[in-house]
Image (spheres, grey):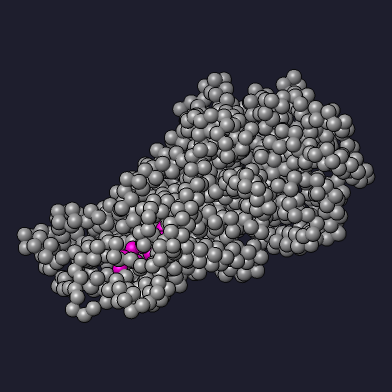
Amino acid sequence: MTGVRVTHIPERKKSLPLGTRITRLVLVVLLAFLSAAWIVPVMAAVLTSLRSFDGILTSGFMSLEGGLSFDNYVRAWQSGGGTYLWNSMVITIPALFILLFLASMAGFVLSRFDIPFARGIMLFMLAGNLLPQQILLIPYNRMAENLGIFDTHFAVILAHIGFQMGFFTFITYNFIRQLPNELFEAARVDGCDMFTMWWRVLLPVLRPPLAALGTLGFAWIFNDLLFALALIRSTDQMPVTVGLLSLQGQFVTDYTVLSASAIITAIPTIFLFIVLQRQFVSGLTLGSVK
Amino acid sequence: MRLFLRDRIAAILMLGVPLALVLSWVMWPALQSIYISTLRWSGTSQPQFVGLENYERIIDDPMFQTALENNIKWLVVFGLLSIVGGLLVALVVHEQIAGWKFYRSAFFAPIAISFVVTGFIWKWMFAPTGVINAGFESIGATGLTANWIGDPDIALWSIIIAATWRQIGYIMILFLAGLKAVDYFTIEAATVDGAGYGRRLWYVVLPALGPSTTTVIAVTVIDSLRTFDIIWTMTQGGPFNSTQVLSTLMWREAFGNYNLGYASAIAVIILLLTLGFVIIYLLRAIPKEAR
Amino acid sequence: MSRTSTDTVSTRVKPLAGLLAVLASSALVAGCATASTDAPAPTTAGGTDCVANGISVQNWNVGEAGADDPMLAVAALYEETTGNTVTVNTVNVEVFRSQLPTYLTSNNPPDVLKWLAGSTTAGFAEAGQLLDISDVWAESLGDLPEGLKALSTDTRGAQYFVPTNYYWWAIFYRPSLFADNGYSVPETWDEFIALAEQMESDGLIPVGIGTSGAEWVATSWFDYLNLRINGPDFHRALLRGEHDWNGPEVRAVFEKFAEIQPYIDPNSSGQEWQAGLEKFFNKQAGMTLIGGFLPVPDSVGDDIDFFSFPTIDPSIPRVEEAPTDGFFSPATTSNPECAKQFLAFLGTNEAQALLRQGANIATNLTFPESEYSDLVKKGRDLLAAAADITQFYDRDSSQALGNAANAANARFIAQGPRVLDQILNEWDSSSKKIIEEQGLD
């Protein structure tokens, strides 16, 4: 094969050819079955959420007895589901924006300028994201009290910003490192100072990793349980994760309403996921694979 | 690049603020926890310094031993299942056999769902009259029905199943990305030379996946040791403490028994256990010759 | 991914380190976790205006699906009668429990908290965390029984707690079920076992229970068996750590426990207590040992009755369990005057009528009989006739000891005598450890 240069390899060829058609057929069947089984849990929950409690009592979970309706969703929403959802948004979106904002700055400075111990600082910040959250809970409790922000969304937002900052910075850092020098040199020649460079030159280019971090970060912050559990006291301030536990305590055996609550709390991330799948995937891989 | 004066200020702020946030909201609380672990304190009483006494008590505590065992079981089983499972799925999906886009989405979908919702859905599925038992009964396999989360001998494994269900898609994506980077020239050459799938896999693909695998393992270990949400949602450490892990134990000691010092010691132990893997991950993440 | 050229800046960013230190340390100032909060200066009161300075009440519910929390009605009534402002915040009981210490040490604590009588609350009082309300007792709570006053008094003789309702524990059954199957109410232990056997042969689950997420329900069995076999003095001494949990007396308890264990719902660990109750209400289970807090569905109505835990040793005095709920105020409250007014209100019949919620008994002795259903009257009489009253294992000892007991008893119910040695030895060693640690405080 010497001397043969293939400059463009079409997608299909990038495979480990499995050979026999039988093998492929078996795999298709296996995987089809597995994937169907994989989505059963969610489908089952959706089904249950649409059914009536009496229907379940009389004929169990596997039937359609009792008719389908959105009543459970209404009840779940009114029992707090709506409030919890709003709280989650109020916590997640500001935290996310601040994180993206600050991480792009930090990544920029660390990767493009001769900062002493830049690598060390980067590792230090990243390490923050790898600590077990448990070690932060009790101090957070006390710190929030002392600052007078206990039981507020602000406290939870701060906690998330601090905790995720390292990873976000790491991603932007990696990305910015790979940008062509010409980009910045041209800006410098134009007389841009650091801040303007960041704002005018860098941010527009940073869209892919920021989008990825945005979607991934949304999921992480939205789905967090521990920080909220440690910092929020009032029911009307709770985000969906804590709220769902609360509803579980309230509706114990009424799985129809509970399923509806679970689905309501999951909808934003599911929606985001469907619309921004690609960003999710690239976000996951940015930090883990060279 | 020349640095204007205002650039220095800009640099200080642009790096300093994020760094200060990490320091004040992660590092400082972590240090405080270490300090609290040397106290006897209920949160309302006066704190009392007791040195390493909490740690001595922890070592003697059979509950701690159970929790640690469970964490290790979790680590090994959940780790193996999700990593190997994720790899296998990735390998097959990568082949782009018929319907691969559907398979990929199906496996990846659970990532959008929080561990709380995951725990909740599976808890309901595992109920004695739930979907799983009902399913077995409807096909006549009544012998396979079980008290999935009420039986202390199998509760932990049931939770692991639920967690793996959610995790495999994540691992799959990571490996899929890694597979894209495999050197296909070598693969083709090997095929031409007559190497079968197995050998191509073993000698070319897996070594190429080495870097991603290390990261995947490090992250899985770290997450296994701090896992809380799904266990708390499904069993809260029960039945009869059979599914207690370090994090649930810590929670109970801190917010149920009000033993903040003891709880902080448990948290510090979690930290120490993950430290090795944190270091591995960090070293891999930013190689020395990066600059 | 290596960089192709180095991008160096000639000057070092020295001030960076300095400013970082400043930024970091300013955050540290806020951070010292063990710094205790100072009690805020008392509001200068020329007769406190409780309308403008409303109080906040931190409330919890066990979560009866859909039920309107009675606390809201109480607050509304209070606002109507006095014109003072009250805001109620309700959380799930487990959230409340985990946040309770933070309420007491908060800079901005709730003014009134609903909680349980027992060792935890007493512990707070001993540590000076609770508002002294002896004046409220002297002025407004004269209609509450002496026994409950003693329960609400700390070792210095000051009162800190307003008990508002209590309930009894007993074995509940459905009279219609008993009538249909010809069962009669057992008085002795042997009769009880015979009844269980009969129920089983009739295709029922003799004893219903659910312990998932609520293992304390199982401990009620231990409490009663221990009280019936070894008596209240031993029970209390055991909870103080003066006896072995794997000693002969406790083993005797489990010998009897083993007689009923086979008749208890084998699914106990797989269902919540509410699910266990459902089976009881569906007549799938014949009896259940539960407290007055049980939520009786409308469909059941009057078709519910109970009998006291059967006698085992006639020479032992009959003791009943009667957990008491009530309210207290943190010492750091910024509004003690208004809080006390509210606490006084909670002792009145009107407030207790609302708080009572079904099968609870009001603590006010002048509470009108007519408000009680026959069931509740029977329960109250049961308690009045008891030789002694205990609260419940964890209320009489501590949360930590309760955890150990709950796990042990829930396990015994689910797994039976074959693991008895294991259970008792574990229970003994963990409890002894806890006692040791408690003793060091």
Q: Is residue C52 visible?
A: yes
Question: Magenta segment, which residues?
Answer: B170-181
Q: Position of residue C189 (x, y in %)?
A: 89, 43
Magenta stretch contains residue A186? no
- Residue C6's place in the image compared with C198, above or below, is below
Q: Image quadrant for the N terminus of chain A?
A: bottom left
Q: Position of residue A145 (x, y in %)?
A: 45, 48
- Left or right of C426? Residue B286 is left
What secondary structure prevails in the magenta region? helix
* Residue farthest along the front direction in this orientation: A21
Magenta stretch contains residue B175? yes
- Residue C201's place in the image compared with B1, above or below, is above
At x 75%, y 50%, the residue is: C413
Q: Position of residue A264 (x, y in %)?
A: 45, 39
- Left or right of A252? Residue B16 is left
Quarter assignment of residue C386? top right
